[in-house]
Amino acid sequence: MSLVVVGSVAYDGVETPHGTVDRMLGGAATYISLVASYFTPVKLVAVVGDDFADEDSALLSSRQVDLAGLERVAGGKTFFWSGVYSDDMNDRTTLRTDLNVFADFDPKLPDSYRAEPYLLLGNIQPALQRGVLAQMSQLKMAGGDTMNYWISDYREELLKTIAQWDFLLINDSEAQMLSGWRNLRKAAATIQAMGPRTLVIKRGEYGAVLFHGGEQFFAPGYLLEEVFDPTGAGDSFAGGFIGYLAGQGIEAKGADFAELRRAVIYGSVMGSFCCERFGVDRFRSLTREEIDGRFREFQTCTQF
Ligand code: AMP
């Protein structure tokens, strides 16, 4: 049972206290797809230009990601984003966003994608996210991600979009912005009333809080010895979360809270691996055994 992933495939430039990379494979949908592919088959929907390198599509193919929905625009350039991190790496400043072919992205799902049961909508314009959901006929669980820009400038569109979602992944400052509450509990209740019964509020290195119906669960962040590059950690979290649920065949309706808790831990596990190297590099060598080993570490570290 496949997971359909929609979002950006990009080239990124990143500067962290550990070094600078001018151009490397990135994009939210890239991280989500690579990560989720450890748990379930993935079908990608995105757009790139003809500068998109064969070795980059080969990396996705090597993880069996279906690229039938990866549109290539002849003569176009792939989305480029660059950013610089603060010394403690908790803050990021965007230096450049060249939308290029991403500016006209209007995701059309191949017929072979439309009956799949799982959908993860990466951070794109909310009306486009809604358009994708409308193309799918047999969803068991759908949801996604958003960002401050859509919350402030496209609020009405966004509210219509998340009203249809089973789950929303959002960071704490965005949750405050969306709900109008600083208090996490009030923020969560307000956002859940907007539609998504399952809500994950991400808190960077401090982990994440899962809200489901009236229940809550706190997932810690893994204590890495060294963070090289946090780019894509949020997307990797999302890939681990939905990838695990899809792999287990969980349906939104009647979803077991224990499975959702495990999904959040897999999210934390995958976010932590992402930070160990620049860009997607950690996923070139990561194995399922390493993932399950770190999952068990989380169990031992939090049992009492
Ligand atoms: P994260 O660190 O999880 O927020 O994800 C960073 C990734 O999101 C990078 O690889 C960027 O290429 C991608 N990205 C940055 N800005 C945007 C945007 N406006 N729309 C879609 N993707 C973006």
Image (spheres, rainbow, N blue to C red):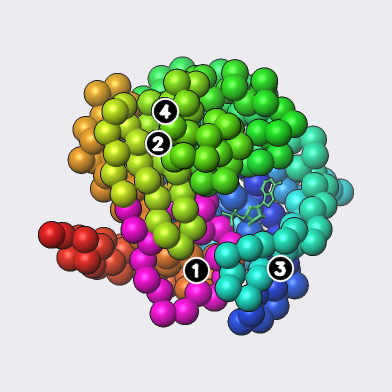
Q: CA distance from mark 3 to mark 2?
A: 32 Å
Is residue 162 at all visible to an observer of this figure? yes
Secondary structure predominantly adopted by residues drawn in magenta: loop
The residue at which mark 2 appears reads as 185
The residue at which mark 1 appears reads as 275
Q: CA distance from mark 1 to mark 4?
A: 31 Å
Q: Is residue 15 magenta?
A: no
The answer to whether mark 4 and mark 2 are in CB contact below 8 A is yes
User: Between disc 1 and disc 3, whose residue precedes?
Assistant: 3
The answer to whether mark 1 and mark 4 are in CB contact below 8 A is no
The residue at which mark 4 appears reads as 189
User: Between disc 1 and disc 4, whose residue precedes?
Assistant: 4
The answer to whether mark 1 and mark 2 are in CB contact below 8 A is no
Image position of 221 (left or right of 152) = left
Query: Which sits in the foreground, 208 or 288?
Result: 208
Image disc number at residue 122:
none
Looking at the image, which residue is at 41% across and 20% down?
Answer: 138
The answer to whether mark 1 and mark 3 are in CB contact below 8 A is no
Image position of 54 (left or right of 175) = right
The residue at which mark 3 appears reads as 84
Q: CA distance from mark 4 to mark 2?
A: 6 Å
Q: CA distance from mark 1 to mark 2?
A: 28 Å
Query: Which dot, 1 or 4, sits closer to the camera?
Result: 4
Which amino acid, by three-letter code, is at mark 1?
Cys
Looking at the image, which residue is at 48% across and 28% down?
Answer: 191
